[in-house]
Image (spheres, rainbow, N blue to C red):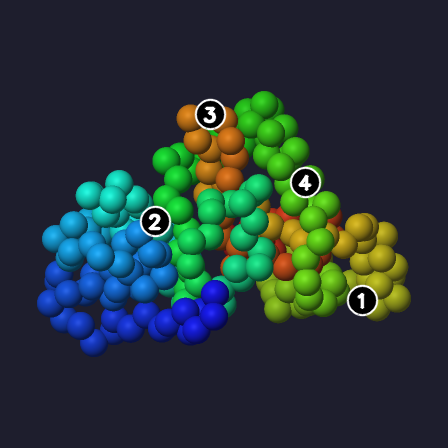
Amino acid sequence: MGEKSFYHLQFQHIAVAYLRHQPYVNVCRALIPELRDADNSDFDVCRINGGITNIMVKVSSKKKDHSVVVREFGPATEATCHLLRPAFCPELDGVFKNGIIQTFVTARTLTPEDFLDDLVVAKVAKELRRLHQQEFPGDKEPMVWTDISRYFELASAVTKFENPEEQRKLEAEIGGPVVYAHDMLPGNVMVDAQGKHYFIDFEYSRFNYCGTSMPIEALLGTK
């Protein structure tokens, strides 16, 4: 997207309540051609709940009948636009230095109770398998043991391996195909009225063993 990829969303020093939303309108004007001539009064801007280290804002143009989500990434994450594929995610409308813009999808976020429904789980599993079959760029070194090592003190309270060789043997047995594993929480899956499922929040995804498509915090019971 050329120079537009480096559009930086600045908002920290704006104090007036209405003007606090203006940067989100500005970035949408800069990156979405059909919104460039819209007036400020034409926009509705509201914060979307969710996101651990990022801010999500819905920007709607009343006259253009166009709504998008501006996702501003936090200091610990970066825009992973090469992972956001229309087959699995809401359409990517724009990329700027510290975030992305996606088409707003009228859908609901799944809940832990949804994951108790075998039919829902089967549909999500089918989409996750399709995701795992995709080719993604990057180092394909599994990250699960690196992540676990960061929680070693917590993990050692559950079990402790005094024999490093046995530990390495068990780690090798747990392995499997290395895929791009999504942060598979119910809140990271949406479903629309037609039953289409979307994956969102890819900032904590990484290459891992096929069976680790969930955050390590969930595996260790810390989330």
User: Of marks 4 and 1, which one's residue comes earlier in the chain?
Assistant: 4
Residue type at mark 1: give it: Glu
Q: Residue at x 42, y 38 (%)?
A: 109
Q: Are marks 2 and 3 in contact (CB under 8 Å)?
A: no
Q: Residue at x 49, y 26 (%)?
A: 195
User: Of marks 1 and 3, which one's residue comes earlier in the chain?
Assistant: 1
Instruction: Determine the CA span between mark 2 and mark 1.
Output: 53 Å
Residue that mark 1 sits on: 162
Element type at mark 4: helix
- The dot on residue 68 is 2
User: Of marks 4 and 3, which one's residue comes earlier in the chain?
Assistant: 4
Q: Position of residue 70 (x, y in %)?
A: 35, 56
Q: Position of residue 56 (x, y in %)?
A: 34, 55
User: Of marks 2 and 3, which one's residue comes earlier in the chain?
Assistant: 2
Element type at mark 3: loop
Residue that mark 3 sits on: 194
User: Of marks 4 and 2, which one's residue comes earlier in the chain?
Assistant: 2
Asked if residue 193 lies left or right of residue 185, the reply is: left
- The dot on residue 130 is 4
**Pair 2/1: label in front:** 2
Instruction: Determine the CA span between mark 1 and mark 3.
Output: 53 Å
Residue 152 figure quarter: bottom right
